[in-house]
Amino acid sequence: MIITFAFDVRNYVEVMEGWPLKRDNMTFFLEREGNVLKRVCLSFSGVSIEHAPSFASPNDASGRAILKTSDGGYAALARKRIMNWQAVVSGVQIIDLDYDNFEMRFRAESTDEESRIHLKSIKSSFDQALNYSCDFEQFGRAFCAGAIPDHRIESTSHYREGRLAFEAGRYVDAYNNMFLFLETRYCDGKTKTAQQVELLSENSELCSCIKKNAAELTKANQARKDENLDLFNSCANVRDKIRVLVLLRGKLRHHSLKSPSVPHLT
C-alpha cells in the first residue's frame, strides 16, 4: 500500500514545478493550484495493508461502527523528512507548513489490497481539539478589558502555543511552551535554576497544582517504574518536584536527537 501525507501551506508561495522526486521508498511532490503552492506531500510505498483504515462492528446499542486508523509511525517520519526539506529551502523561500493538521491518503499497490482499503483519505482533526462552546458574553467582555502589559501578553502566547502543541501530540513543544509560560509569568526575568526554583516555590497556587497532579499521576500508575523524575516520588517535597521540572526544561531546551541522554517523551 502507498500512504501519502499532505501538509497544507499557510503562506503564499508560487512554484513552477510539482516534481515528483523519488528516494528509496519515499516520493516527494508539491500540489499546486495554478502556480500557487497549496500542499507539500510525501508518499511511502511498501506500507503494510494493516495500516489501512477499517471499520469495526458496533459494540454498543448505538449501532455506530468504529473507524480504526493508524499511521504506523509514518506521520512522524513524514514530518521529520519534510522539516529537513523545509530547512534546506528556507534560505531561498520561507514555506509555512501546518504540521498539526494533515491529510492521509491510501492507495493500493496490488489488486489484493484494493478490497481492504475502505477509505481513500482521512483529514486529521487536531484543529478542532480546542473548540468548545463559550457564552457570547464572555467574548464581548474581552473587548472591554483594559490595557494588558506586554509581559502578560507574552506569557499568554506561550500558554496558547503549549495547548495547541499538546492537543496535536507534540509533547516536547508543549512542555517547552508551558514552562516558558511559567518562566515569563512568575520568574521575574531570572533564568538560573536556583532562582527559578525559589520563585516558583513561593507560588502557592502552582505548588497546589503540582501536588494534586503528581498524586493523580502516581495513583493512575502513569509513571513508568524506571522513571527517574522525582515528580512521581511520593516522598519528594514540592520544592524537589519543581526543581525536577526546571531541570527537565533545561534538558529539552538543548536536546539533540544524536544524544543518548535525551529524555524520551512521547
Image: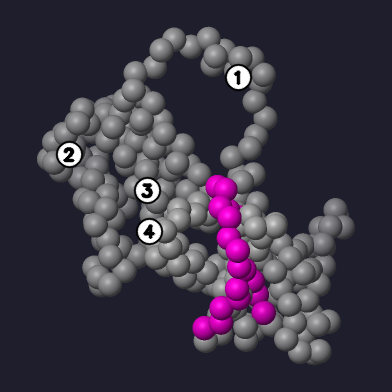
Left or right for 128, reference 174: right
Q: Amino acid at mark 4?
A: Gly
Choose the circle earlier in sequence order: 2 or 1.
1
Quick check: 19 above or below 92? Answer: below
Q: Amino acid at mark 3?
A: Tyr
The secondary element bearing badge 2 is classed as loop
Query: Residue 231's x, y, as percent?
Result: 29, 50
Mark closer to the observer (4, 1): 4
**In whole angstroms, how far apart are the C-alphas of marks 3 and 1?**
28 Å
Left or right for 103, reference 98: right
Label 4: which residue? Answer: 91
Choose the circle earlier in sequence order: 3 or 1.
1
Q: Quadrant of residue 200?
A: top left
Mark closer to the observer (3, 1): 1
Quick check: 152 above or below 242? Answer: above
**Residue 139, numbered label:** 1
Report the residue at 82% width, 67% height from top. Answer: 57
Label 3: which residue? Answer: 175
**In whole angstroms, how far apart are the C-alphas of marks 4 and 1?**
41 Å
Task: Give the magenta part as a residue range.
Answer: 2-23
Choose the circle earlier in sequence order: 4 or 2.
4
Label 2: which residue? Answer: 191
**Placement of the C terminus among the 4 image quadrants:** bottom left
